[in-house]
């Protein structure tokens, strides 16, 4: 069933129905603002609460208590007057708050007084030799299959990387009867010392106990190799083996499936295409939008909440969603704020939810060799550009990612840089002895997700059609 | 501390880069000043059309001069610029449009220009098999083609630097002034002085001209383009329409560039443009009707470059009508890319020799300032 937006204009349009978007839309609608929630997936939940309304996994312990928090958020959204459209891909947002959205193969345009972007996070690229082989996939993709279809790996499976999601996925796979042969932990030894000063905050955060018990649960069942400093996938047209170096010793093991993960980064494509200013975050090693305390961006009327505002996790995302929505209510219908939680309380909630984050960021900061590849390792999958190709272009005058497009078409394929952007920035920064901030990022353009020519051709006509006869 | 050079060129588009290179070839030491980086705006993000076809008559000699350079661009730049020459075809969608084409070709022939050639339906179908059956013919310019605009502009810049040009990118030229027979320009903490100043600042050139007492009727525009995913090869020449705003080009890798002059809103001070999707939808509809093969293609990106458009659609090219040593090279009005190589060569001749064999007399800034003559 295809549902077009009921109105042409809304007080608030929220983009993304993960933790932040669900909370923002419910808050905004509760205050009486006309609210539209647009979400790309078939149901609410985003990545963290994916398939929360439809998962075939019914044993609550298997996905963990944190997952089922999502059900309450969906409940309060459904109780509100917010209009919700799923399978809705927003492909353009500009500084006039004009939004173009594709729903069931037809595009519509809506206008908003405020936009709250809750487009969440993406997995950081993990460009090792062989990462483009069939049989190598991201942990996030594996988790999507697990949550929506209860599918788990049954062949020889290796997981490699670091970060909370890696351990969570390992635990979920094992609980659902899946197979994991080995976990290769790429956390740098030095990170433990770097993270130490922030350990106290972490020890008193909700993540600590949960994280520890999950790692214990996994380590009881799977061989974990720590201190992995090199990693490569190999095979002839299909993954056959994974080789790694740990403690100076190289080992190669046969594998049918390699799941890679080294953390998540903000999904900045829509925000950047709208012209929102971003800065390089040297701790999280990614681009983050420049925001005020209520999540307002450099473009008037657009706020960002959730992991798209900087990685903070699901609990922080929910609070940031409420804060951004409350700020929208304050701007559009100040009287209605009486119904909402006071800002001071929300900010206290946020501080609590963000406790321990710096520790995690420091501990799970990916090592340079796993972020900045060399030689024949593919950087840009869409155009099959290697690290060496990028360095060759730098040598003949490419100064940043946008100039590189002219030499190598990097970032010009369908993924619009999602799989190569960070790698290209860091690789060029290293080669040119500059900071990532100085090197910059791709200028991103709509459509942020591809649409068909037929779909664009079918959008409602305007009077310009009639008078457009003079060739420029 | 002021550095003395032979010429100061403001603007790192294809025109500024080409003029800088040709000044180097003539033995001068110029400095090129670009506030962003070479090819950041229109020169790097245009459709890449290398077109003599359908040009305004006053700029045809410059276009022909330029075509000669395009055809040996590798020798000049050590870079092929991805230039390819499969012709450009102007499609008439009905008999009335074909009559206009016929009159145009006759007019050019009478003036001695032979690059445009009237074609019938059969030749149109041979050149562009995918075109709708109903189109009765058109015009072809067989030596025309297309190149990669960012690659080309960058190649001009690189070669100029190799031949001794000083290039300053990332800082705008400021405090432009004339004293003691020299033009002085500040670039951040640096200062340059030269007897020659070339204003090739694209969308920013009108302001420079006005500040030097030569205001011209110019506006800033941002023509939009969009590109599709790869589709099987089906077309070689660049295709433009007589009656509707559309230009169309398939690259070697299968992607198809769709343009034609629908405009975005430029935000010049922020280096930004806001696209008008309702106008892009018109282009999509035109392609949908004319090329059924394109209907399933996806659009992966759309953009617009900021540039200057003159009220009369003809560039401002040649010496200032007020100041000694000042030259203008801007206002190419959505069709300056092909002219870049030739315009640089001619500009260098004007500067070095004081004249040129290429007819440019209708392009001068004095057309807006008859009293200064």
Image (cartoon, coloured by chain):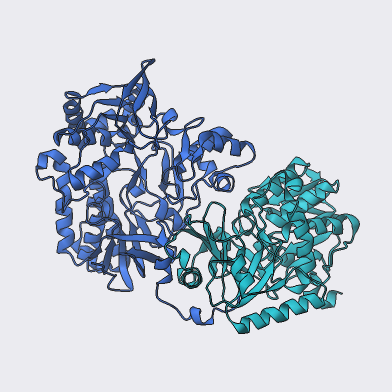
Residue A196's x, y, as percent?
Answer: 31, 25
* Residue A101: quadrant of the picture: bottom left
Above or below for A286 versus A329: above
* Colour of the chain lettered B: cyan
User: Is residue A61 shown left or right of residue A131?
Assistant: left
Frontmost residue, B88 versus B125: B125
Above or below for B325 versus A143: below
* Residue A78: quadrant of the picture: bottom left
Residue at the extreme bottom: B96
Residue B329's x, y, as percent?
Answer: 75, 62
User: Is residue A154 shown left or right of residue B31?
Assistant: left
Residue A98's x, y, as percent?
Answer: 40, 67
Q: Residue at x 79, y 75 (%)?
A: B109
Above or below for A93 versus A215: below
Q: Residue at x 67, y 68 (%)?
A: B333
Q: Quadrant of the N terminus of chain B?
A: top right
User: Is residue B59 shown left or right of residue A188?
Assistant: right
User: Is residue A68 shown left or right of residue B103?
Assistant: left
* Residue A297: quadrant of the picture: bottom left
Residue A338's x, y, as percent?
Answer: 20, 63
Frontmost residue, B143 versus B366: B143
Q: Is residue B38 visible?
A: no
Residue at the extreme left: A59
Count of numbered labels shown in the rendering: 0
* Colour of the chain lettered A: blue
Q: Quadrant of the C terminus of chain B?
A: bottom right
Frontmost residue, A227 versus A386: A386
Q: Is residue A192 visible?
A: yes
């Amino acid at each position: 069933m295809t549902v077009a937006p009921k109105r042409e204009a809304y007080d608030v349009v929220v983009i993304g129905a993960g933790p932040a978007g669900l909370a923002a839309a419910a808050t905004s609608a509760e205050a009486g603002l006309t609210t539209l929630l647009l979400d790309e997936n078939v149901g609410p939940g985003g990545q963290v609460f994916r398939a929360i309304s439809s998962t075939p996994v019914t044993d609550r312990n298997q996905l963990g208590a944190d997952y089922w928090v999502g059900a309450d958020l969906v409940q309060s959204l459904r109780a509100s007057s917010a209009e919700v459209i799923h399978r809705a891909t927003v492909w353009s947002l500009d500084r006039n708050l004009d939004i173009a959205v594709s729903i069931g193969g037809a595009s519509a345009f809506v206008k908003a007084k405020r936009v709250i972007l809750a487009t969440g996070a993406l997995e950081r690229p993990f460009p090792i030799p062989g990462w483009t082989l069939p049989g190598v996939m991201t942990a996030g993709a594996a988790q999507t299959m697990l949550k929506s279809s209860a599918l788990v790996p049954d062949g020889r499976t290796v997981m490699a990387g670091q970060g909370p999601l890696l351990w969570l996925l390992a635990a979920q796979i094992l609980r659902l009867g899946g197979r994991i042969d080995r976990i290769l932990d790429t956390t740098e030894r030095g990170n433990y010392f770097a993270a130490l000063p922030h350990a106290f905050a972490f020890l008193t955060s909700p993540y600590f106990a949960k994280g520890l018990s999950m790692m214990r649960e996994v380590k009881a069942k799977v061989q974990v190799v720590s201190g992995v400093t090199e990693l490569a996938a190999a095979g002839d047209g299909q993954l056959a083996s994974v080789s790694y170096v740990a403690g100076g010793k190289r080992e190669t093991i046969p594998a049918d499936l390699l799941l890679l993960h080294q953390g998540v980064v903000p999904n900045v494509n829509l925000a950047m295409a709208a012209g929102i200013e971003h800065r390089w975050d040297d701790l999280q090693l990614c681009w983050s939008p420049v925001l005020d305390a209520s999540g307002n961006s450099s473009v008037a009327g657009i706020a960002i909440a959730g992991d798209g505002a900087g990685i903070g996790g699901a609990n922080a995302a929910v609070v940031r969603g409420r804060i951004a929505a409350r700020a929208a209510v304050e701007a559009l219908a100040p009287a209605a704020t009486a119904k909402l939680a006071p800002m001071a309380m929300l900010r206290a909630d946020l501080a609590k939810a963000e406790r321990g984050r710096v520790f995690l960021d420091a501990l799970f900061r990916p090592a340079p060799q796993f972020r900045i590849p060399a030689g024949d390792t593919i950087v840009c999958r869409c155009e099959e550009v290697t690290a060496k190709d990028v360095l060759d272009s730098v040598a003949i005058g490419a100064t940043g990612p946008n100039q590189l497009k002219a030499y190598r078409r990097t970032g010009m394929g369908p993924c619009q840089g999602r799989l190569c952007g960070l790698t290209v920035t860091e690789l060029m920064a290293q080669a040119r002895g500059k900071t990532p901030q100085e090197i910059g990022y791709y200028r991103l353009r709509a459509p942020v997700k591809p649409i068909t020519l037929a779909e664009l051709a079918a959008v409602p006509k305007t009077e310009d059609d009639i008078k457009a006869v003079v060739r420029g | 501390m002021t550095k003395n050079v032979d010429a100061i060129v403001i603007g790192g588009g294809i025109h500024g880069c080409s003029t800088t290179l040709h000044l180097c070839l003539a033995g001068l030491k110029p400095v090129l000043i670009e506030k962003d980086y070479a090819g950041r705006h229109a020169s790097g993000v245009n459709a890449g059309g290398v077109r003599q076809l359908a040009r305004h008559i006053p700029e045809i000699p410059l276009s022909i001069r330029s075509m000669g350079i395009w055809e040996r661009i590798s020798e000049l730049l050590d870079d092929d610029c991805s230039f390819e020459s499969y012709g450009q075809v102007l499609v008439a969608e009905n008999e009335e449009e074909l009559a206009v084409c016929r009159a145009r070709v006759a007019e050019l022939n009478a003036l001695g220009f032979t690059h445009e050639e009237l074609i019938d339906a059969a030749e149109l179908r041979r050149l562009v098999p995918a075109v709708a059956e109903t189109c009765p013919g058109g015009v072809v310019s067989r030596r025309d083609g297309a190149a990669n605009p960012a690659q080309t502009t960058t190649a001009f810049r690189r070669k100029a630097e190799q031949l001794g040009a000083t290039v300053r990118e990332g800082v705008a030229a400021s405090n432009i002034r004339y004293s003691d027979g020299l033009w002085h320009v500040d670039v951040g903490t640096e200062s340059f002085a030269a007897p020659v100043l070339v204003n090739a600042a694209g969308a920013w050139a009108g302001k420079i001209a006005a500040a030097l007492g030569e205001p011209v009727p110019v506006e800033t525009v941002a023509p939009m383009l969009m590109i599709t995913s790869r589709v099987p090869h089906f077309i070689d020449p660049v295709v433009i329409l007589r009656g509707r705003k559309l230009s169309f080009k398939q690259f070697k890798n299968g992607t198809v560039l769709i343009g034609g002059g629908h405009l975005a809103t430029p935000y010049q001070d922020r280096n930004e443009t806001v696209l008008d999707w309702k106008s892009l939808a018109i282009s999509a509809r035109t392609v949908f009707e004319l090329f059924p093969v394109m209907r399933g293609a996806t659009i992966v990106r759309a953009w617009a470059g900021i540039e200057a458009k003159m009220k009369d659609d003809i560039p401002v090219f040649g010496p200032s009508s007020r100041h000694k040593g000042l030259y203008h090279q801007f206002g190419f009005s959505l069709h300056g890319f092909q002219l870049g190589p030739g315009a640089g060569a001619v500009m260098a001749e004007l500067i070095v020799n004081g004249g040129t064999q290429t007819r440019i007399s209708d392009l001068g800034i004095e057309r807006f300032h008859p009293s200064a003559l």
